[in-house]
Structure formats: structure tokens, C-alpha cells
Image (cartoon, helix red, strand yellow):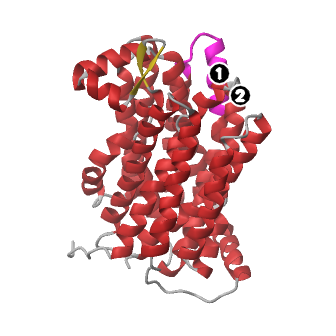
Amino acid sequence: MSKRTSFPRVFWVANSIEIFERFAYYGIYMGFGIYLQKLGYTKGDLGIIQSIFLAISYLTPLFSGTFADRYGFKKVLIISYLAYLPSILMLIYFKTFSGIALTMLTIGFAAGIFKPLISATVRATTDSTNKTLGFGIFYMMVNLGASAGPLVMGKLRAMSWDYVFYTAAGAIAVMFVITLLFYKEPKRDLDNVSLKQKFRDIGIALSDFKFLLFLIILGLFYWMPFWAFFNILAVYINDYLDTAQLFNGVSGVIGQGITKALIASETDGVWRINAEAISHTGYIIIIFQILISRVFEKRKAIPSFLFGLFVAIAGFVVLGISVTAASGLVFLGVFLFAIGEMITSPRIQEYIMWIAPKEKAGLYMGTNFLAVCIGALSSGIYTWIMGKFEIAGHPEYIMYTLALHLLIGILAVFIFDKTLGGFKERQE
């Protein structure tokens, strides 16, 4: 392998912005199911809002990436902040189902404007010598914010949910300042074609049956169970596991003081683990992402992706067992899913991005989000199904169902790759 090119300043500025955005996004989202149930809404209601929120979050990048290619990343980033900040504050005042759904749709729209811009910046500032490491660093920064958000918000919601929303809005304000002062457009080949032509390019990309089929397969058999994991796990832990027992177990390992300070809250005299603090993969990815990226950077994308799915399946199975056997197994289940995520998510996104010409990074990243949108839109049904399994007395069945879903996904991707072949990655 040739010597790696160093990363320019804007690469690190963009990754810093990503940390704050994920802090706000996941800080709200990971505990949102607990919040909605506190207001008296059902898991079915939660699933509807989750689907709306995630769908708009991942549909909007189809267009925002295109606008960013045309008008510049910095301008579109600022537009996203102007939509993001007030919509978060609206959660303090809206308590009806329609009001919350509308507010979350607005937040999803703002997040969707933002989403493709940082990854496209990473693409524009990397080359064939550092692309895998660059996307690994990016993914680690995503999870640094995604870890800190639920930790902080889990403590704040014990005092007041309003503090959660004020803090998230503050993070967006910090992003605005960083972008205004330090973000500079990455050097890339810009085309001057009309927006109409840009949208026509999306249509052309999606008219490729092979590429479109690949996106649909990823949406239904990878992103759908992937998002279901994040949709349901905080509620799953909060409702079905003994979080007081988890507190005692964690305290025995890292000490009661640290546990209380970081991931637990006291309710009615009993200390319990905050479910959102341990129901995500970010804290694991922070530690292991660079190692995983280095291990898999010389390996082919699709075989690596399939292997990662097998690891994620094991995670779902262990999470199911944690309800009926030992609550502490939840940590192993999350760890296994995290390893699977570290292998699959950055690698499949990198794979698709490197199909694209460098000057169309935003466009192709937007097109890639179609697959994520398909999975996001359909993932809310698993929250509803979890409620049905709960009524039947077997909430753990939701995890076994998701494991089976991923297993079918492995078969679908394998058949696609063997019958239609993969895509050729560009080398510059």
C-alpha cells in the first residue's frame, strides 16, 4: 500500500461538527421512547413517530446533497442549523401526539439536510491511500457524539426533560459558530449544471436496475433491522430488564460512584441504570473502530459486510437471552452488535461512495440515503411488534425475529453478489 495522504484541516473541522450534531440527535432520540411512554403513548404510537422521523431524516438527503453540490456545503450546513435549533425547542411546548409528530418531522428534516454534508466532506478530502481510515475516523466521531448525548441526557431527564431539549439546542448553536468561523469548502471539482440536471442525474442513477436493486436489498435487509435495534433497545432495557440489578452489577465492576455519576439515576430511593446510556453502540465503537477499520481495510467490501452481519445476528440472539436468563448479558449483546455495526456500516457506505466520481460525492451520498430511508420508514413496525410480543408475555421474541431478518439479508446480498456481480470501486 502507498503512503497515506495526510488529512486537511477541514476534515477535522467537519468531524468536530459531526460530534455535536450526533450529541444532540442521539441525546434526544435514544431516550425518546421512554419520554413518549411517560406521556402515556403506546409502543404503536412510538413506532409511527419513529418511522416518520427516520424516513424524513433519510429522504431529505436525496435533495440536500444535490443542493450542497450546487451551492456549497457551508451554506447548506447553516440552513440546516436554522431549521434544527428552533424545532428542538418546540419539544418543550408540544405534548399532543400530532404536535410531537410534527415537531419530530421538523427535526428529521433539519437532520436530513445536514446528514450527507459531513460524509461528503470526508469523501472530498480523502483519496485511495486514506479512504478506509478516513471513514473509520468519521464513524468514530459519529459515535463519540452518539455516546455522550445519551449519557448526558439520561442524567438530565431525571431532573427535567426540558433540560434535555435545551442542551440539545445548545449543541446546535455551537455547531453554527464552528461552521461560521472555521469550515471552509473542501477542494473538489464542481460542476455548473442546473439543479434540473442534478435531479436528472439521480433519476439516471436509480434507473440502473442493478444499482437500484442493491439499494432496495440494503434498505429492507440491512437498514431496517439496523434501525429497529436503535428504535427499541432503550425501551426494551427500561421495560423488560431489571435496571436496579444492572446498577449493582456495573457498580461491582467500575465502582458505585462512577456508575452513579455517569449512567444511573435515583428513582424512589432506588438507583437504576439509565437505559439510554447503555442501549447504543457508540461507547464501544469509540474504542474499537480504528482497530476494526485497520483489520478490514485490505479485505474485500462485500465479504466483510456479510461477516459483520453474522456478528450482529449473534448480538440480537444474546439480547433475547438477556431477558430470560441474566440481565447482564445485555452488555455482551450490545457489544456483539457494535462489532457487527463497525464492520458493516462504514464499509458499505464507503463502498457506495467510491462508486461515485469525486465531483458527485454529495449526489451519490444522497442516492445512498435512499436505501437508509427504505429501512428507516419500515423499521417502526418492529416497535409495534415488540408491543405485541410484550402482550403475549415474550418480549424477547423481538430480538430473535430481528436475528432471523438479518439472516435472510445475508442470503439476499450473497445471491445478488453471485448472480449480478459487485460494483467496481474507483481508485482516485
**Residue that appears at 54% across and 64% down:** 116
- Given residues 127 and 239, the one toward you in this image is 239
Secondary structure mostly seen in magenta is helix
Residue 249 place in picture, x, y as percent: 30, 17
Asked if one can make out residue 354 in the rendered structure from this viewpoint, the answer is: no
Residue 237 place in picture, x, y as percent: 48, 23
Q: Residues within 10 Å of mark 2 (few under 14, many from 20)?
A: some
**In this figure, which residue is indicated by the disc labeled 2?**
44
Q: Amino acid at mark 2?
A: Gly
- What is the quadrant of the C terminus in the image? bottom left
| Helix, strand or loop for disc 2 | helix
Asked if residue 288 lies left or right of residue 234, the reply is: left
**In this figure, which residue is indicated by the disc labeled 1?**
387
Residue 168 place in picture, x, y as percent: 53, 48
- What is the quadrant of the N terminus in the image? bottom left
Quarter occupied by residue 200:
bottom right
- Given residues 239 and 196, the one toward you in this image is 239
Residue range of the region highlighted in magenta in the rendering:
381-397
Q: Are marks 2 and 1 in contact (CB under 8 Å)?
A: yes
Q: Amino acid at mark 1?
A: Gly
| Helix, strand or loop for disc 1 | helix
Q: Residues within 10 Å of mark 1 (few under 14, many from 20)?
A: many
Let me know if residue 385 is in the magenta part.
yes
- Given residues 215 and 121, the one toward you in this image is 121
Residue 172 place in picture, x, y as percent: 53, 57
**Residue that appears at 30% across and 73% down:** 7
Q: Earlier in the sequence, mark 2 or mark 1?
A: 2
